Image: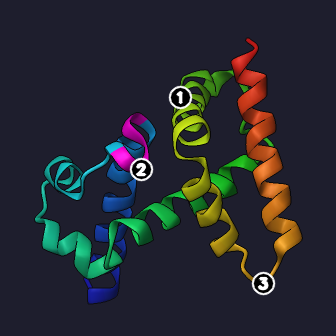
Amino acid sequence: MTDVSIISKTEENILKVARTVFLNYGYEGTKIAKIAHEAQISTSVIHYYFRSKKRLYSKFVFKLIDALFDPYFVDSEKKENNEAIYRFLNLEINYNSDFFFSIVEELFVEDYEMARFVILQWKHFYEIYKNK
């Protein structure tokens, strides 16, 4: 096994755990120590790969954006997943919106229109699930 595959597996494990923690607690409620504990690694490993909570959160948001454009994303079989994302958006849009949307804008710094489109899609997804 090469070092590259170990790095990929470690990063994927961190992102998988971070996804669950961020979905449940939002950015403000998430602590790197919680992610490290759940991933059964030290906080220094997370800092080695992502440097900061903000960078880890950015990577997480980017992966959620990918999911948003997945044609099967709103599939009823994924209802539990969609509800978790709705709860997350409820936290971030209602209590941390400036920071959340600034992260999206940073991800698309070269394409302001795409950033605005993604934000509108997030708000649309949020409104759909809020009204169910």
Is-magenta flag for residue 26?
yes
Magenta span:
24-28
**Residue located at (51% from left, 35% from top):** 91
Of residues 40 and 129, the one nearer the viewer is 129
Q: Relative to residue 116, is residue 29 depicted above or below?
A: above
Q: Work out which quarter of the rendered image holds the C terminus and state it.
A: top right
Picture quadrant where residue 101 is located: bottom right
Picture quadrant where residue 4 is located: bottom left
Disc 1, SS: helix
Number of the label disc, if any, that sits on residue 110 = 3
Tag 3: amino acid:
Glu
Marked residue nearer the N-terminal end (3 or 2): 2
Looking at the image, residue 47 sits to the left or right of residue 52; the answer is left
Residue 18, position as x, y percentages in the image:
36, 52
Q: Relative to residue 74, is residue 121 depicted above or below?
A: below
Tag 2: amino acid:
Tyr
Number of the label disc, if any, that sits on residue 27 = 2
Looking at the image, residue 31 sits to the left or right of residue 69; the answer is left
Of residues 128 and 9, the one nearer the viewer is 128
Tag 1: amino acid:
Arg
